[in-house]
Amino acid sequence: MADVTTKKRPLLRALASGAAARCPNCFRGPMFSGFLRVREQCDHCGEALHHHRADDAPPYFVVFIVGHVVVALALAMELALVPPLWVHMALWLPLTVAMSLILLRPAKGATVALQWALGMHGFDPDAPEAADKSVDSAWR
Ligand SMILES: [Zn+2]
């Protein structure tokens, strides 16, 4: 008989749900309460989302993606057309800012969902949550 707490979590579906700013567990509830602030728990299913430790990973992914796209386009344009510098600034600076703002939220949602699907940090349903409480209660 399978233990309910050890069920496998769907990685790809969770990533897609997280990138869409939805709860990785029910795929319906919103993950964020602000632009990048992750909710304490899902409003729809009650899944705890506060365990995430996204930290610098989402901005790193965004810089990696945007850098590769913008630098490749700027180099291609420079080689093909040799435009003046102001054309580069007028094109690539707004594109860099826009792409960064557009990609940051999906990157953070997918990072949180990845941590949830892999059971990282406090997302592991089999983790002994009583460890912290027992230490805490030992000092009282
Ligand atoms: Zn949910």
Image: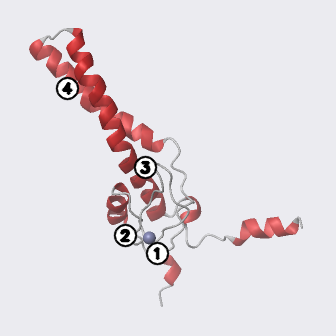
Crowdedness of circle 2 by 10 Å Cα count: few (<14), some, many (20+)?
some
Q: CA distance from mark 2 to mark 4?
A: 37 Å
Q: Please state the quadrant of the image where ligand 1 appears.
A: bottom left
Decide which of 92, 4 is in the foreground and name it: 92
Indicate the position of residue 133 as horizontal and vertical percent values.
76, 69
**Looking at the image, which residue is at 19% across and 26% down?**
73
Crowdedness of circle 1 by 10 Å Cα count: few (<14), some, many (20+)?
few
Indicate the position of residue 32 as horizontal and vertical percent values.
45, 56
Q: How many marks?
A: 4
Q: CA distance from mark 3 to mark 2?
A: 17 Å
Q: Which residue is mark 2?
A: 28
Q: Is residue 129 left or right of residue 12?
A: right
Callout 1 touching callout 3 (CB < 8 Å): no
Q: CA distance from mark 2 to mark 1?
A: 8 Å
**Looking at the image, which residue is at 42% across and 73% down?**
8
Q: Amino acid at mark 4?
A: Leu
Q: Is residue 107 visible?
A: yes
Q: Amino acid at mark 2?
A: Arg
Give the secondary structure at mark 2: loop
Q: Which residue is mark 3?
A: 108
Between disc 1 and disc 3, whose residue precedes? 1
Between disc 3 and disc 4, whose residue precedes? 4
Q: Which residue is mark 4?
A: 73
Callout 4 touching callout 1 (CB < 8 Å): no
Indicate the position of residue 18 as horizontal and vertical percent values.
38, 58
Q: Amino acid at mark 3?
A: Lys
Q: Residue furthest right?
A: 140
Callout 2 touching callout 1 (CB < 8 Å): yes
Q: Nearer the viewer, mark 2 or mark 4?
A: 2
Q: CA distance from mark 4 to mark 1?
A: 43 Å
Disc 2 residue: CB within 8 Å of ligand 1: yes
